[in-house]
Image (cartoon, rainbow, N blue to C red):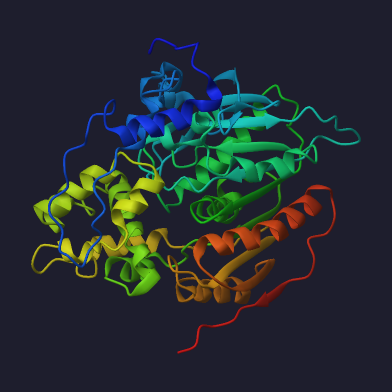
């Protein structure tokens, strides 16, 4: 356990950490990347976020015994609470006036092995009467490979990148559930994300917070959308005891094979940013499927060094390091994802559509998303529709991934707020605009 630095002012802690990182006088420099071809990303290697968080007085999860697995983890039921604690939530480093309870609970990984992960349940001081207080489960786009990037930690340090979005549900009196749905090992776009979301809701219901009978809605964009939609798909078979009123999602890949083919190759213009998603995916998937996503087997020594470095970063420095750096340039001769049957099998198994949600869905996707092309999403939307999903889908006619996140968020807040208050979800519709060929 680290020695707390209680005199440090929280309002300036994140800024101070960044300044120290830039100065190079406090944070040890990481091993340099290999030289890159002149047509690839030439940014210098950045410090990792864990290096910056090491400057703060709250220990990162890897050094905090509260997160430790119990010796008898397999004896716990999915969603059963292992331990709990009350913590201070911070927004941009400043204490935020809410009650936050963190729950460590048992869930299952993609192979159905028992795992422990955490969720943070935030309750505003606004009274609620007439019914159990509704809950919005907010799945942040974690998209990272280190447990210090998970919201149970960043909510405490004030660096959770989407924290301000949750305020608009809190202001209405709703409780917020924020799970570490990628687990301590930080998975990415796999069905165990849905298990961890559902088990976080079971843990919340099992807690002493008075939310056992609350109505629940899910929200998530990008990586958060992946965890949310997988929870909606798995609810009927994995957690029928969790009652979902609706799920609002956007900006995530549906067909992982198609997404991988897009992200591995050099792309022109703004779409070249998408290259980072394959480095992130490879680093994360190699933890759950090490025999298939084997860097030593598939990648050159330079590619192996990049994957190793990507294994301990949060999304922003992963994006900075992996943009305009196609992983296809680092395959060994004769190697690729397409020619590795086990990789393609896993990507197909973890793609969406193996289950159809049995609760209302509100889904949007940008027609010009530089990270996730609409063609990766629209066939699955069509499949959902044809199989009778209770779906409301529209193609956002705007460019850029974050622009579409911002534009789609207000309708998602309005829709989830309505269903949480008991209003009907509205008629099904599918307003998709195919990309021109």
Q: Residue at x 40, y 25 (%)?
A: 60
Count all numbered tags in the image, as a single digit.
0
Closer to the camera in the image, 370 or 432: 370
Closer to the camera in the image, 31 or 312: 31
Q: Position of residue 70 (x, y in %)?
A: 42, 19
Q: In the rendered view, does 260 fall on the left or right side of 379? A: left
Outermost residue, front side? 23
Outermost residue, right side? 130
Q: In the rendered view, does 34 fall on the left or right side of 309? A: left
Outermost residue, bottom side? 437
Rendered image quadrant of residue 184: top left
Q: Position of residue 358 (x, y in %)?
A: 66, 59
Q: Residue at x 8, y 67 (%)?
A: 333
Quarter of the figure with the N terminus? top left
Quarter of the figure with the C terminus? bottom left
Q: Position of residue 50 (x, y in %)?
A: 35, 32
Q: Position of residue 318 (x, y in %)?
A: 34, 49
Closer to the camera in the image, 79 or 305: 305
8 to 188, vertically: above or below: above
Q: Residue at x 65, y 67 (%)?
A: 389
Q: Residue at x 77, y 35 (%)?
A: 213
């Amino acid at each position: 356990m680290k020695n707390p630095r209680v005199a440090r002012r929280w309002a300036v802690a994140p800024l101070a950490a960044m300044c120290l990182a830039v100065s190079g006088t406090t944070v040890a420099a990481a091993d340099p990347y290999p030289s890159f071809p002149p047509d690839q990303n030439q940014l210098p290697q950045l410090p990792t976020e864990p290096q910056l968080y090491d400057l703060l007085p709250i220990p990162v999860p890897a050094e905090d015994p509260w997160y430790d697995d119990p010796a008898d983890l397999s004896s716990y039921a999915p969603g059963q609470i292992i331990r709990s604690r009350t913590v201070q939530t911070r927004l941009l480093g400043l204490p935020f006036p809410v009650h936050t309870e963190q729950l460590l609970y048992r869930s299952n990984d993609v192979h159905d092995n028992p795992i422990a992960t955490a969720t943070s349940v935030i309750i505003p001081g606004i009274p609620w009467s007439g019914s159990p207080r509704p809950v919005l489960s907010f799945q942040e786009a974690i998209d990272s490979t280190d447990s210090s990037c998970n919201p149970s930690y960043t909510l405490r340090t004030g660096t959770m990148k989407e924290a301000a979005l949750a305020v608009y549900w809190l202001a209405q009196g709703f409780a917020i559930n924020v799970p570490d749905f990628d687990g301590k090992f930080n998975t990415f776009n796999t069905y165990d994300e849905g298990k961890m979301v559902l088990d976080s809701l079971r843990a919340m219901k099992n807690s002493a917070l008075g939310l056992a009978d609350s109505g629940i809605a899910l929200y998530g964009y990008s990586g958060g959308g992946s965890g949310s939609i997988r929870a909606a798909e798995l609810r009927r078979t994995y957690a029928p005891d969790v009652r979902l009123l609706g799920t609002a999602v956007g900006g995530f890949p549906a067909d992982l094979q198609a997404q991988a083919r897009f992200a591995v190759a050099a792309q022109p213009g703004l779409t070249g940013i998408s290259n980072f998603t394959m480095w992130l995916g490879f680093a994360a998937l190699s933890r759950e499927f090490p025999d298939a996503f084997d860097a030593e087997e598939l990648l050159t020594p330079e590619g192996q060094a990049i994957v190793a470095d990507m294994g301990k970063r949060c999304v922003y420095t992963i994006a900075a390091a992996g943009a305009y750096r196609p992983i296809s340039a680092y395959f060994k001769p004769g190697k690729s994802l397409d020619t590795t049957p086990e990789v393609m099998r896993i990507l197909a198994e973890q793609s969406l559509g193996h289950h159809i949600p049995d609760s209302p869905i509100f889904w949007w996707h940008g027609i010009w998303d530089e990270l996730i092309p609409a063609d990766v999403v629209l066939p699955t939307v069509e499949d959902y529709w044809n199989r009778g999903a209770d779906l409301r889908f529209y193609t956002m006619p705007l460019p850029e991934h974050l622009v579409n996140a911002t534009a789609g968020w207000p309708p998602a807040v309005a829709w989830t707020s309505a269903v949480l208050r008991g209003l009907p979800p509205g008629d099904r519709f599918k307003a998709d605009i195919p990309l021109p060929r």
